[in-house]
Amino acid sequence: MEQEQMTPMMRQYLKTKEQYKDCILFYRLGDFYEMFFDDAILVSRELEITLTGKNCGLEERAPMCGVPFHSADTYIARLIAKGYKVAICEQLEDPRLAKGIVKRDVIRVVTPGTLVDEHMLDEKKNNYLCVAYKNDKGFGLAFSDISTGEIYATTMAGASYAENEIARYAPAEIIVNAAAQAEIGVTVTDRLGVKPEVREEDFFSSYTMEEQVLLQFRAAQLSDIGLSADGLDTIAVFGMLQYLEHTQKGRVAYIDHLELYAVSEFMEIDLATRRNLEITETMRDKSKRGSLLWVLDKTKTSMGARKLKQWLEKPLVNPIEINNRLYSVQELFDNRMLRDDLAELLSGIYDMARILSRVSLGTVSPRDLISLKLSLEKLPELGALLHNAKSPLLSTISKKLDIMEDVRTLLEAAIQDEPPLTFKDGGVIRDGYHEEVDKLRRAMTEGKTWIAQAEAQEREETGIKNLRIAYNKVFGYYIEVTKSNLKDVPDTYIRKQTLTNCERFITPRLKEIEELILGASEKISGLEAALFEEVRKQVEAQTDRLKAVCETIATVDVLAALAEVAYKNDYVMPEMTESGELTIRDGRHPVVERMLRDTIFVPNDAHLNTTDSRMIILTGPNMAGKSTFMRQVALITLMAQIGSFVPASYARMGTVDKIFTRVGASDDIAAGQSTFMLEMVEVAGILKNATAKSLVILDEIGRGTSTYDGLSIAWAVAEFMQDKKKIGAKTLFATHYHELTELEDKLDGVRNFRISVKKRGDDITFLRKIVPGGADDSFGIEVAALAGVPNEVVRRAKEILKKIEEEDLNGAYKVKKKQREAPQFQIGFEENAALEIAEELKTLDVTTYTPIEALNKLYELTKKAKGDL
Ligand code: ADP
Ligand code: MG
């Protein structure tokens, strides 16, 4: 583009855009944000707004589209939801006062991982930005939620750990270096649905790195905050600060408390397990309803809701820390009055954490401050309620609670009870807080009386009875006289406007009054804004104390919620031990039991240890309840380790370091990833990572391939898992390969269990009780009958089964089976080729091909289809 010939404004636009190439630039022009060129074309398409043009000095007009600034938020939200970033470029001076072109600059970049606007955020969820850095020593990860001011960092060796850790936070945006992208980019994109953004190496390094990190976290040296100059976590944190600087323009001083942790402090749950156990969302539609979080979330505040989700994402492994939480839940469980009082009190507390971030970012509204005040008003009562608490966690909280008297008093004195949305229109500062404001306000109210008086006086002096004084924006206060009375208008009146049946005048006396009134209102809004800013700064200065209060409220809220759920759903306190034992009596699946409508959930026992009962082989017909049982064991373990009571009549357990669950391919079809390959990749992951302290759930693995392959794999996996020298993890293994029940006699520590069913004639009833022993029959055909498959088909199936079993005895079946399988593989291959070709076609851009190239491509594709390539 010929910049020389462009209008100065367009040159300014292009210069700004140059610095924010990765963003859509919202360029403020008067009452609109305008977009130009490619941005305009893109936005007009994405948001369906009209594309126009603007003269830019060149022959052709620049494509342009715009949105009104006062409703920009909704447009920005829609663009963010579509994965774009928006840079907001504001006018930095009053256009009326500007000499030449108005000064403009980007004041904020809105990206999916750095949202602060409450309308764009889910109040019950953190919104994380992730920075992942990789070099030959491993990975450094940093996570931050700037809407709450949290920042976490950790390091790890391998890519799979990094992926699991990223899955834990499910960030909305991920920044990586090229090395990290190479290792985790594909998995993260495919399985977490977020495409990482690659930044150059120099983004992650600078000779001022140490200085900047120290400044942010107000530390004297790196070791004070657990970092070192060459640490991977330091680099990740620095990358985070760089990105926040770029997007927030240096207003993130409030993110000053770095939480450094080691992955080993929390239970490891890999990506597939997290999904499969439906901890915070369901597998199918990603909804909260139907997840464990849905059952447990009886929190009253947004801060509590987010904290509970964090606990679920990071179960503890240290029994002392777990007991700390459990004892408090116990205390609240036992004390119903306290629980009810807390619930009521907490219901009146607003999202102080996010308000606090807005205080620091300077976007806080007067109403936010009132919400903050109302929340702080609850603190003395909270202190009183917890005063007699006995459990260590609650009594520490009650002793340390800061009731924030000073901030509350300030807000009470300074801010009107029901202030307008913004302070621009005044009416924010409370009467009596500031003398000048009071004086100006008086002038304004008295102004009305003055006008009324002036009107009466003019009427009397002129004798015009219907004379009136009114106001409009164009010429302020004026006197209006109807046509019939014009003859009585004195010479001192200055005519301003003539309408059909009246005329409008002003007088010097009227203008004097006007000046007093309007001057006051103009002065007052400026003064109120300044006072509000002062109050904001005073609140900001107390950020640390207020953050601690938010933390306290969130924790109390979660503990009270867990106690309430435990009470309502009849849970018990698990007994945490140092042993490797896991005993559950009358365990129930926390979610399934809430979902069942017409039937009652049948409780079941489970017992695993590190000696004679390390592995349970679970058999039973389809739909008997195998998967439900195994998941319930995993969920009960997980619940205990976040400090929750559990759905059982008794539970005793040592903590586990990791939980794994793998589901055979065909159970996973909903995810569209029902390939045997994926199943095996996941099994490989377990075999590499499980330890003797892990809990492993294997649900019909081997199902995605032919019977004999599947059986052999399942068998070998079971052996490896059970072997104390290899892994020796506590394992629940559901299988339809009844052959595996032979392992009980062959290997030590293996126990057979089955889910009982009652068979009467052709009818079966699921009893859902787990009993020792292996099932000898899969009842597949009975289940088919139960599902309503026509009698004729069921009868025929039985005939076939009988025949096959006879043949099998004669050894003939195996040969035939092999023959049947061969063509199956062929079909699989062709389908695969077709898929590959379809994929390739999708990515082809035919417009870029010459006719010859196109012909070559076609030839290549045909060969592929025939299987020659
Ligand atoms: P399987 O894995 O053996 O095929 P599932 O665990 O998927 O069976 O269970 C099938 C259905 O049976 C579940 O969706 C649930 O509705 C019901 N179910 C399972 N276990 C129980 C139980 N203990 N009590 C009541 N209903 C159960
Ligand atoms: Mg199942």
Image: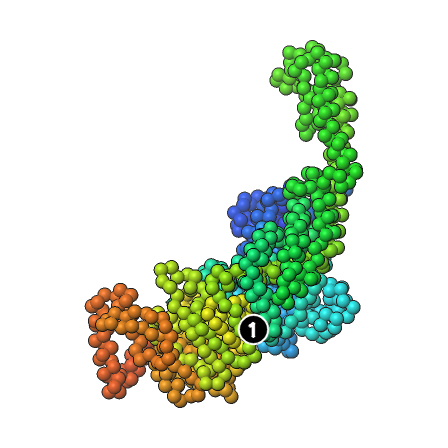
**Front residue of this view, candidates 307 and 714:** 307
Please count the marks in the image. 1
Density class for disc 1 (Cα within 10 Å; few <14, some 14-19, many ≥20) is many
Ligand 1 found in image quarter: bottom left
From this view, report whether residue 239 is shown above or below residue 697. Answer: above
Q: Is residue 714 left or right of residue 758?
A: right
**Front residue of this view, candidates 92 and 481:** 481
- Mark 1 secondary-structure assignment: loop
**Residue 95 visible in rendering:** no
Disc 1 under 8 Å from ligand 1? The reply is no
Q: Please, what is the three-letter code of the amino acid marked with disc 1?
A: Met
The x, y position of residue 600, in whole percent, is 38, 64
**Front residue of this view, candidates 382 and 820:** 382
From this view, report whether residue 355 is shown above or below residue 742. Answer: above
**Front residue of this view, candidates 860 and 402:** 402
**Residue 808 visible in rendering:** yes
Res. 545 image quadrant: bottom right
The residue drawn where x is 42% and y is 64% is: 592
The x, y position of residue 655, in whole percent, is 55, 76
The x, y position of residue 441, in whole percent, is 74, 34
Q: Is residue 806 left or right of residue 556?
A: left
The x, y position of residue 750, in whole percent, is 42, 84
The residue drawn where x is 69% and y is 59% is: 401
The residue drawn where x is 57% and y is 48% is: 74
Q: Is residue 698 left or right of residue 369?
A: left
The color scheme shown is: rainbow
From this view, report whether residue 20 is shown above or below residue 507. Answer: below
Q: Is residue 205 left or right of residue 113?
A: right
The residue drawn where x is 37% and y is 80% is: 772
The residue wearing badge 1 is 267
From this view, report whether residue 636 is shown above or below residue 581. Answer: above
Q: Quadrant of the C terminus?
A: bottom left
